[in-house]
Amino acid sequence: MLSEASRAESLFERTASPREKKRVQRIEDIIDTAALIFVRDGYAQFSARRVASELGISLSNLQHYCGTTENLLLSMIRAKIEVFVTQFVAIAGDTSRPAEQRLIDVITQDMEAARDPWIASFSFQSWALAEHDQAVGEHLSAIYETFCRVMGELIQEVNPQLAPGRAQVFAVLIASQIEGLLFYHKHTSALKQNWQETVDTTLAMWLMMIRAG
């Protein structure tokens, strides 16, 4: 079954004009280049001018597509972080499948993303930037709050006896532990050789906690 995002992308491919497709491709190229610079050079060295230089275009040309540096940063975070939450929301909402299996799929995919060193670096830089940029901070907060809300609702489906507040506590605990794994996997070798065992163990603990309430 196609997700809403996949259906929208398919419709765009069928109906968009060549000019519209070219514009979308240019924006994607800008965002991908911006993300590479963001990770490679760090948030403190990031600028729209540096992105334009890397692409070999003028700053005004880049701004034509992406607006201000702030807009570029927010677009980049949507493309590289928010996209995961969008996928998780689609998985959680597929009520044709058992709730526990959907929960396992969301957790497993989130943990797999946490294992990617590039995603880890992008996340670290985003959090650091959020300490100094209110708009980015608010957007990141909204992304993680959405993830925790969806997780809480899914946890309640798995165990309907849980009060909403307790399900949310479980959701935040799981989310924060996955973020911790992201840090440890990138910066230590403690998890790399036993990653599958780590996934299996954490899933077993969390499911036991949720079932017990």
Image (tube, rainbow, N blue to C red):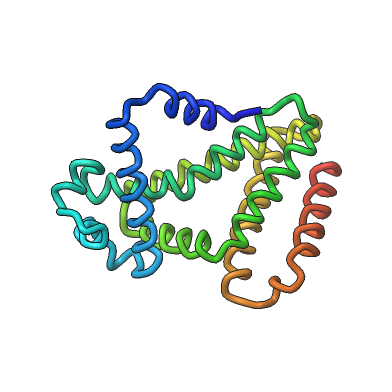
Seen as rendered, the residue at the extreme bottom is 189
Q: Residue at x 34, y 63 (%)?
A: 37
Residue at (74% x, 73% y) in the render: 193
Foreground of the two, 145 or 65: 65
User: From the viewer's perspective, is residue 65 above or below residue 131?
Assistant: above
Residue 180 lies, in percent from the top left, at 61, 63
Looking at the rendered structure, the number of numbered marks drawn on it comes to 0
Position of 74 compared to 162: left or right? left
Residue 116: image location, x then y, percent:
58, 62
Point out the image quarter for the C terminus: top right
Relative to 29, residue 44 above or below: below
Q: In this rendered view, identify the residue nearer to me: 11 or 170.
A: 11
**Please, is residue 73 above or below residue 102 in the view?**
below
Q: Residue furthest front?
A: 18
| Residue depicted at x 18% and y 41% | 64
**Frontmost residue, 172 versus 55:** 55
Residue 89: x and y in percent read: 60, 35
Q: Quadrant of the N terminus?
A: top right
Left or right relative to 93: residue 133: left
Residue 91 in picture, x, y percent from top left: 66, 35
- In the visual, does 182 lie left or right of 45? right
Q: Which residue is located at x 78 percent, y 38 percent?
A: 101
Q: Quadrant of residue 43?
A: bottom left
